[in-house]
Image: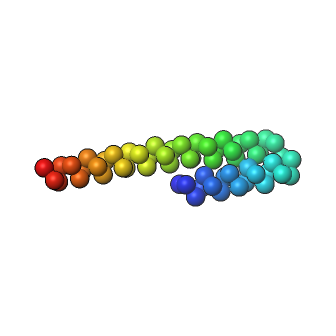
Amino acid sequence: MLGMALAFFIIAIIAAVFGFGGIAGGAATIAQVLFFLFIVLFLLSLLSGLARRGKAAA
């Protein structure tokens, strides 16, 4: 998912260089949403892993 966010970010940069403002804005928005979704899923995974480790030790 982080790779997809990076790909959309690169598409947004290329589109901005060539002057396609609407496409660049759309790709940048998609990249931002995917990045924040990645962060949320990463944190949930991290917390669930810590919770499992705590149960196994007890």
Colour approach in the figure:
rainbow
Left or right relative to 53: residue 7? right
Q: Nearer the viewer, residue 50 or 36?
A: 50
Q: From the viewer's perspective, is residue 21 above or below residue 49?
A: above
Q: Position of residue 55 (x, y in %)?
A: 18, 49
Residue located at (79% from left, 41% from top):
22
Q: Quadrant of residue 7?
A: bottom right
Q: Nearer the viewer, residue 46 or 34?
A: 46
Residue occupying the far right of the picture: 19
Residue located at (17% from left, 54% from top):
56
Residue occupying the far left of the picture: 58
Residue located at (86% from left, 47% from top):
19
Q: Nearer the viewer, residue 51 or 33?
A: 51
Left or right relative to 43: residue 9? right
Left or right relative to 19: residue 24? left
Q: How many marks?
A: 0
Q: Position of residue 8 (x, y in %)?
A: 67, 52
Q: Position of residue 23 (x, y in %)?
A: 77, 45
Residue located at (58% from left, 58% from top):
3
Left or right relative to 2: residue 22? right
Q: Position of residue 32 (x, y in %)?
A: 61, 43
Q: Quadrant of residue 25?
A: top right
